[in-house]
Image: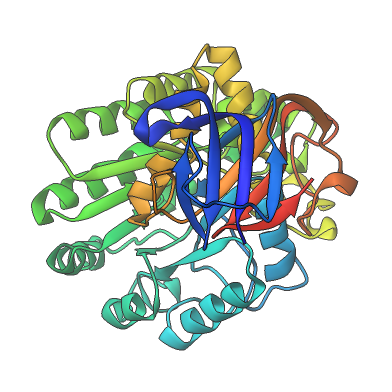
């Protein structure tokens, strides 16, 4: 399939390109930007006038719910949601049922995703068996099966000796550990940020110190072992400050923030809005401002969707009992664009947080429009508003704090490996 994308505004943050160019695709690759290759005859032409043509988005945290939790979502529903949101590559945490701690499960997931021919799926293997934090998983075998890194998902390792050994092993073989910083005992039974809103609503809080204490352990052990660590979903001002200092010291760390945390605070809980029951919890206005500052000064590397589809019944329970999570694959682009507009961040810089930066963290060949690279492309209208409504979402999970809002930034076409997998 040869595709000619014409008249579009091409933005490639990795190459610092932002200008009107035609894009020529063939054999699954980017053949040329600007002038057509000699003898090129397109099978399909896409008029991208007034549209943005950029590398496909890369999401660092998207739960697909397979294997084991198909009543919440299926692989096909979530990968259709991904391409509808312009996401062409995604990393999925290992907290499935069963846990991704066996090579066979990883191979099965990769095989099924490849058969669907939608977004590329990059599994994160379990760091410990059954995510129990006691015995290290067979990281070498999981890597050979296709895992790009190792994670505990939302389950903390309380035994720092196990964490030390995990980092030593990872450092030896150059593996990346994806860790969520939360001290388990301080966070135990907590459901909201430990602040004025939780107090007013009578909800058990999770103090900011829970993130800071966990970060202190992770950063110190990373310094001692030399392990490469990615900190998932930073949420506090203190956490941003700690990472800023660690990066200045030269530690091989990176971090991301959930798009939800850039727009919402503890006050959005309102009167027990279960769509806002998230992990980490929605923090204070001060924390939200610090996360933005962290993105602007390079402390925070990327923005993720933290996509967590939940079945409707699980969100109808009382707040403290409602299941954690919000769907976000289809909202990653529009939420990033809204944040960039509010904070006067250029489109070039904003797209870098959701394409080349996360691709670099995962160590995958994605997030750019370089010649002969895979033609994973997102084409969107930055001016078109659309209503976030359950009926408009491809994801099986209709749970989102942004339901009912109208947002700018509508994906029109998504290409994966040179194939048009999502026409508007």
**Whether residue 324 is visible:** no
Q: Measuring 68% from the left and 33% from the top, which residue is drawn there?
A: 48
* Image quadrant occupied by the N terminus: bottom right
Identify whether 160 is placed above or below 13. below
Q: Position of residue 135 (x, y in %)?
A: 31, 78
Horizontal side of 178 relative to 168 (left or right) equals right
Horizontal side of 31 relative to 117 (left or right) equals left
* Image quadrant occupied by the C terminus: top right
Q: Position of residue 26 (x, y in %)?
A: 53, 57
Q: Position of residue 294 (x, y in %)?
A: 38, 24
Report the front residue among 89 and 393.
89
Identify whether 20 is placed above or below 119. above
Furthest-bottom residue in this view: 104
**Whether residue 255 is visible:** yes
Horizontal side of 183 relative to 260 (left or right) equals left
Horizontal side of 3 relative to 247 (left or right) equals right
Q: Quadrant of residue 403?
A: top right
Q: Measuring 53% from the left and 63% from the top, which residue is drawn there?
A: 120
Q: Measuring 54% from the left and 51% from the top, which residue is drawn there?
A: 40
Q: Position of residue 331 (x, y in %)?
A: 68, 39
């Amino acid at each position: 399939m040869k595709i000619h994308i014409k008249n579009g505004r091409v933005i490639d943050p990795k190459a610092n390109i932002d200008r009107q160019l035609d894009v020529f695709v063939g054999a699954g690759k980017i053949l040329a930007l600007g002038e057509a290759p000699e003898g090129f005859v397109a099978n399909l032409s896409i008029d991208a006038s007034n549209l943005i043509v950029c590398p496909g988005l890369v999401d660092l945290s998207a739960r697909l719910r397979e294997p084991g939790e198909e009543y919440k979502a299926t692989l096909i529903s979530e990968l259709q949601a991904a391409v509808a949101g312009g996401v062409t590559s995604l990393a999925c945490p290992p907290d499935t049922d069963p846990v991704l701690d066996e090579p066979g499960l990883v191979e099965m997931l990769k095989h099924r995703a490849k058969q669907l021919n939608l977004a590329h799926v990059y599994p994160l293997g379990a760091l410990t068996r059954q995510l129990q934090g006691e015995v290290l998983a067979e990281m070498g075998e999981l890597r050979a099966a296709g895992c790009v890194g190792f994670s505990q998902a939302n389950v903390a390792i309380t035994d720092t000796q196990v964490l030390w050994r995990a980092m030593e092993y990872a450092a030896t073989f150059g593996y990346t550990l994806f860790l969520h910083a939360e001290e388990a005992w301080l966070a135990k039974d907590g459901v909201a940020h430990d602040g004025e809103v939780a107090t007013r609503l009578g909800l058990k809080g999770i103090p900011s110190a829970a993130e800071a204490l966990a970060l202190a352990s992770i950063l110190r052990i990373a310094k001692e072992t030399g392990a490469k660590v990615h900190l998932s979903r930073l949420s506090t001002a203190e956490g941003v400050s700690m990472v800023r200092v660690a990066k200045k010291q030269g530690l091989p760390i990176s971090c991301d923030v959930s798009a939800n945390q850039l727009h919402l605070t503890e006050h959005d809980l309102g009167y027990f809005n279960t769509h806002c029951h998230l992990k980490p919890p929605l923090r204070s206005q001060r924390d939200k401002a610090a996360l933005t500052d962290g993105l602007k000064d390079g402390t925070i590397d990327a923005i993720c969707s933290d996509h967590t589809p939940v079945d409707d019944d699980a969100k109808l329970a009382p707040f403290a009992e409602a299941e954690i999570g919000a769907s976000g694959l289809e909202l990653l682009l529009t939420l990033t664009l809204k944040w960039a507009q509010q904070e006067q961040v250029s489109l070039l810089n904003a797209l870098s947080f959701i394409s080349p930066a996360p691709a670099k963290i995962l160590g995958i060949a994605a997030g750019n429009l370089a010649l002969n690279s895979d033609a994973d492309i997102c084409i969107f209208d930055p001016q078109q508003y659309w209503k976030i409504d359950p009926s408009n979402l491809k994801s099986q999970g209709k749970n989102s704090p942004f339901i009912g809002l109208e947002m700018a930034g509508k994906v029109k076409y998504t290409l994966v490996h040179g194939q048009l997998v999502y026409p508007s």
